[in-house]
Image (spheres, rainbow, N blue to C red):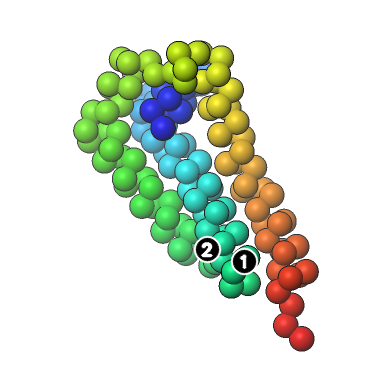
Amino acid sequence: MDVIYYYYYLFYTRILSDDQPNMTVIFTLSVSESFLINGIASLISLKFFCYYINVYPLIGILIMLLISNYLYFYKTNRMKAIVKEKPKIYNSNILSIIITVLFFLGTTSLMFLGPIYIKHYLDVNCQTH
C-alpha cells in the first residue's frame, strides 16, 4: 500500500495540486480499498447465500478504512516516511505507475460494474419460485 499511497500522493501534488494532499490521499485510498473489500464481500454473499448486502454495512467498512488509514498514515507520520522513501515496485517507476493506475481503475470500475453484475446474478441464480 505504501507504493500506491506514494503515487496517489504524487498525483495530488503534481497533477491536481491539492492543498491537503495527504488527507486527500488517505480518503482516496480508503475509498479504493472499500470498493475492493465491498466488492469481494458482495461476491461472497451472493455466491454462497444469494444475499445482497445492504448499503449500511458497506458504508461501515468505508468508515473503518478511513479511520484505520488515518491512524496508520497520518497519526503515525507514516506518510512523511513514504514520501521520503519514494517506494517503488521492483525499483521501477513505470511498473509502480501501472500497478497504481490498474488498482485505481479496477477498484473504481467495481463501483459501476458491481451493481450490474449483482443484479444479473440475483436475477439468474437466486430466483425464488
For this orientation, the residue located farthest to the front is: 90
Q: Nearer the viewer, mark 2 or mark 1?
A: 1
Which mark is first along the chain, 1 or 2?
A: 1
Does residue 4 appear left or right of residue 106 in this picture? left
Mark 2 touches mark 1? (CB < 8 Å) = no
> In the displayed structure, would residue 100 be above or below residue 91?
below
For this orientation, the residue located farthest to the left is: 76
> In the displayed structure, would residue 118 be above or below residue 10?
below
Can the viewer see residue 18?
Answer: no
Asked whether 103 or 20 is in front, the reply is 103
Q: Residue at x 72, y 82 (%)?
A: 128
Q: Position of residue 89 (x, y in %)?
A: 47, 20
For this orientation, the residue located farthest to the bottom is: 129
Q: Cα distance, mark 2 to mark 1?
A: 15 Å
Q: Residue at x 38, y 15 (%)?
A: 86
Q: Residue at x 38, y 47 (%)?
A: 65
Kindly identify which numbered label has been placed on residue 37.
none
Q: Position of residue 50 (x, y in %)?
A: 63, 72
Can the viewer see residue 63?
Answer: yes
Asked whether 60 or 43 is in front, the reply is 43
**Which quadrant of the structure image shows residue 117?**
bottom right
**Which quadrant of the structure image shows residue 29?**
top left
List the residue tagged with mark 1: 46
Does residue 73 appear left or right of residue 54 in this picture? left
The three-letter amino acid code for the residue at tag 2 is: Val
Q: Position of residue 106 (x, y in %)?
A: 61, 38
Q: Residue at x 36, y 33 (%)?
A: 23
Does dot 2 land on a helix, a strand or a loop? helix
Asked whether 67 or 13 is in front, the reply is 67
* Disc 1 crowd, CA 10 A, few/some/many (<14, 14-19, 20+): some
List the residue tagged with mark 2: 55
Does residue 53 appear left or right of residue 23 in this picture? right
